[in-house]
Image (cartoon, rainbow, N blue to C red):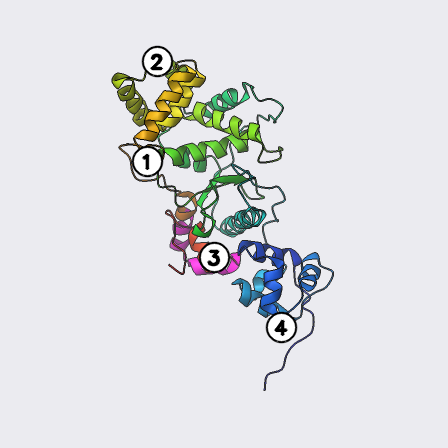
Amino acid sequence: MSVQDSSPILSFDPRRLTLARELQGVRKSDLARSLGVSAVTITHWESGNRNPTKDNVYALALTLGVAPSFLESQFSEAPLISGAPHFRSLRSTTQLSRNQAQAYTQVVQDVVHTMSEYVDFPDLVLPSILTDSDLPGSEIPRLAAEQVRKDWGLGNKPVQHVVRAMENHGIVVVFAPFQSAAIDAYSTFGSEAPVVVLNPTKGDYYRQRFDAAHELGHLVMHADADPGHKVLEAQAHAFAAEFLAPSACIQDELPTVMNGQGWMKLKELKEYWGISMQALLYRAKELGRLSDDAYRNAMVTVSRNGWRAKEPGLISSLEEPSLIPHAISLIEESGVPSEILREKSRVPQHYFEVITARRPVLPVNV
């Protein structure tokens, strides 16, 4: 005969329950149905009005795929992130998906917080050049990109490895889990470090670099701005284009006519600067090298050749995050197994593997 424990658990942290539920992409009503309780009860638990019993906590942990300790308050943990991540389009991103993405960035912070007990991460070198949605035609994206290049010692040469440059200057870069693959890259500031999350299914080297640079633009310019505004997205795009290929270097190189020679030149520039032909075409229009009609005709050619989905290019392998994987290796070499790190961070096994991997990790059920 088993004895049920209906006493309330004193160390229960209601915010961690919300985090666990949102990490799994579960609605309150669905969680309540799985546990055989009312949605109001879940709301009471998450608001801190009532504490679940020990049996409730074990049932919650089992249902949400976390250890019971995940739901407890601890003295040593990364503070919960309050700001929302920057998403490409809030209209096409459901609230459930946004919550799941924000929860994922929190467990990334938990992993970094735990690892920082054993290794020193690079200091953050990131200028703050704030702008807002009231400045659609601003020069700030160009000036911000120039400042980052200056602060990072990049000069006017191509950025050889965008992800590594970001990591070397204190930004944590990880892949998203496959269950969040419907969301493009996104970014947020956390208590431990800024985090950029890359889409695990976008298998294009050139577009991945632009995504990473786009999120870098958000971190530099939009720390205090409400995410999702079209003007902010356009500013981040302008930053990415300038960061990857400075206008002072590329303007005179861009073609003015998209004939055979023009397309050959575009492909050369793509490989040299590591930026897609579509981004270069838009750049040529923005810098006055191509007329609006020439740009539209060029994009018709891009569509006709199937290049919107997959452009021709010499590089097929993605840039890989290395900061966290390298830190894991150093800690393991010092005698601390990664499983100890995972247990201390309280992050579920699959998410820990995704966060600490160099490459996208398939879901556990694949």
In the image: residue 141, left or right of residue 17: left
Circle 4 crowding by C-alpha within 10 Å: few under 14, some 14–19, many from 20: some
For residue 190, above or below residue 302 = below
Q: Amino acid at mark 1?
A: Lys
Which residue position is annotated with label 2? 256
Going from the N terminus, do you reach mark 3 or mark 1 first?
A: 1
Foreground disc of the pair 3, 4: 4
Which residue position is annotated with label 4? 55
Q: Position of residue 283 (x, y in %)?
A: 42, 21
Going from the N terminus, do you reach mark 2 or mark 4 first?
A: 4
Q: Nearer the viewer, residue 362 or 164?
A: 362
* SS assignment at label 1: loop
Going from the N terminus, do you reach mark 2 or mark 3 first?
A: 2
Q: Amino acid at mark 3?
A: Leu
* SS assignment at label 2: loop
Asked if residue 74 shows in the view, the reply is no
Identify which residue is drawn at 47% across, 40% down. 185
Which residue position is annotated with label 3? 341
Identify which residue is drawn at 36% across, 39% down. 319
Measure the C-alpha gap from mark 1 to mark 4: 52 Å
Measure the C-alpha gap from mark 2 to mark 1: 24 Å
- Mark 3–mark 4 CB contact (< 8 Å): no
Circle 2 crowding by C-alpha within 10 Å: few under 14, some 14–19, many from 20: some
Going from the N terminus, do you reach mark 2 or mark 1 first?
A: 2
Q: Position of residue 191 (x, y in %)?
A: 58, 44
- Mark 2–mark 1 CB contact (< 8 Å): no
Circle 1 crowding by C-alpha within 10 Å: few under 14, some 14–19, many from 20: few
